[in-house]
Image (cartoon, rainbow, N blue to C red):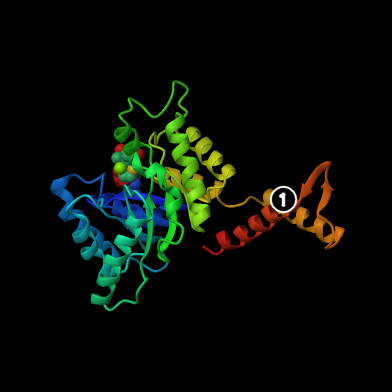
Amino acid sequence: MRSFLFIPADSEKKLAKAAATGADAIILDLEDSVALPNKQAARANARDYLKSASASGPRVCVRMNALDTPLWKDDLAAVVPHRPHAILIPKTISGDCVKKVADALTDLEAEAGLRTDTIKLFCVATETAASLFNLGTYAGASPRLFALTWGAEDLATALGARSNKDETGAYTEPYRLARTLTLAGAVAAGVIPLDGVYKDFRDEAGFEVEARAAMRDGFTAKMAIHPAQVPIINRIFTPSEEDIAHARAVVEAFARAGEDVGVVALDGVMLDIPHLKQAQALIARAETSRSV
Ligand code: COA
Ligand code: MG
């Protein structure tokens, strides 16, 4: 999975557009894009969407309200019987938050006659100051966990910042740290490192630069807030023919050199074992992204 598109669940108009966007997954939002008076309507829309969603469409995920609100249990109760692919937990502080939601899901799955662990979990794991100290705690938290992502907006509010970007438009240090820790935390947990959103949805060139930087650093997927961002994500996070050809050349260079050789030269560049592993991982990812 490469692209995850957010849709405010109180917007029937946007929900109607979801399936045609080409997103690998959609996230029906019950949290920050839905005002308090609309929470009930958003839950009802999310439930109806899940009931009628086609199996050939995007995977349908739901973002619940945060664990420190009185809303999250009713969010889960409304959608779990209709089998969302996953629940996105906002504002997690550590792997313990995942365990808490996993336990609630286990009870609701039993009530709905679903097998335990049917529904997966992922987290926006950098939205509070305390969360930055705990990105290493997600490994082993739950077999349901399949991705970790990060957010710079709530974090800026939590830290008392005036802005999370500098005069050139680049994220400042606290947000670069949050991004890096999320990447490392996700890889350490063996789950998808999912890059965060880009708010300026009319700036497709800026979005492409950010998506490319994420792909270069190791993220394998990115969230979108607007349908125009989806094809850019799908293109950037699908290995190109050129990348695949280069990876195959690396694997072949090692194969030609023989099993007892740990270093080879290709086109004037030294390659050793990490480069071989990188090439093998890219070939494996190219195969799975084709089968999405
Ligand atoms: N999902 C599905 N459809 C969407 C969409 C989304 N996230 N964002 C926009 N659209 C639709 C619009 O309804 C519009 O439809 P129309 O042509 O029938 O009028 C079309 O795509 C073009 O939208 P546009 O006019 O360019 O944007 P907008 O001003 O309507 O909406 C936002 C801009 C930012 C409010 C909107 O993109 C949005 O709600 N994004 C998601 C926000 C969110 O979920 N945030 C929480 C996570 S950070
Ligand atoms: Mg938020």
Ligand 2 location (quadrant): top left
Using residue 107 as the reference point, say whether residue 99 is left or right of it.
Answer: right
Q: Nearer the viewer, residue 49 or 250?
A: 250
Asked whether the viewer can see residue 13, the reply is yes
Asked whether the viewer can see residue 1, the reply is no
Q: Residue furthest right?
A: 257
Using residue 157 as the reference point, say whether residue 257 is left or right of it.
Answer: right
| Residue at 44% in and 43% down | 229
Regarding mark 1 in the picture, which secondary structure is present there? Answer: helix
Q: Label 1 CB, ligand 1: below 8 Å?
A: no
Give the total number of marks visible in the rendering. 1
Quarter of the image for residue 270 reads top right
List x then y, in percent, for residue 128: 33, 41
Q: Residue furthest bottom?
A: 113
List x then y, in percent, for residue 112: 25, 75
Q: Nearer the viewer, residue 246 or 218?
A: 218
* Placement of 83 over or under 191, stated as above or below: below
| Residue at 45% in and 28% down | 172
Q: Nearer the viewer, residue 170 or 244?
A: 170
Residue at numbered disc 1: 275
Q: Residue furthest left?
A: 37
List x then y, in percent, for residue 15: 29, 54
Q: Residues within 10 Å of mark 1 (few under 14, many from 20)?
A: some
List x then y, in percent, for residue 2: 49, 53
Quarter of the image for residue 20 reads bottom left
Report the amino acid beneath label 1. His
| Residue at 49% in and 55% down | 192
Using residue 243 as the reference point, say whether residue 41 is left or right of it.
Answer: left
Quarter of the image for residue 159 reads top left
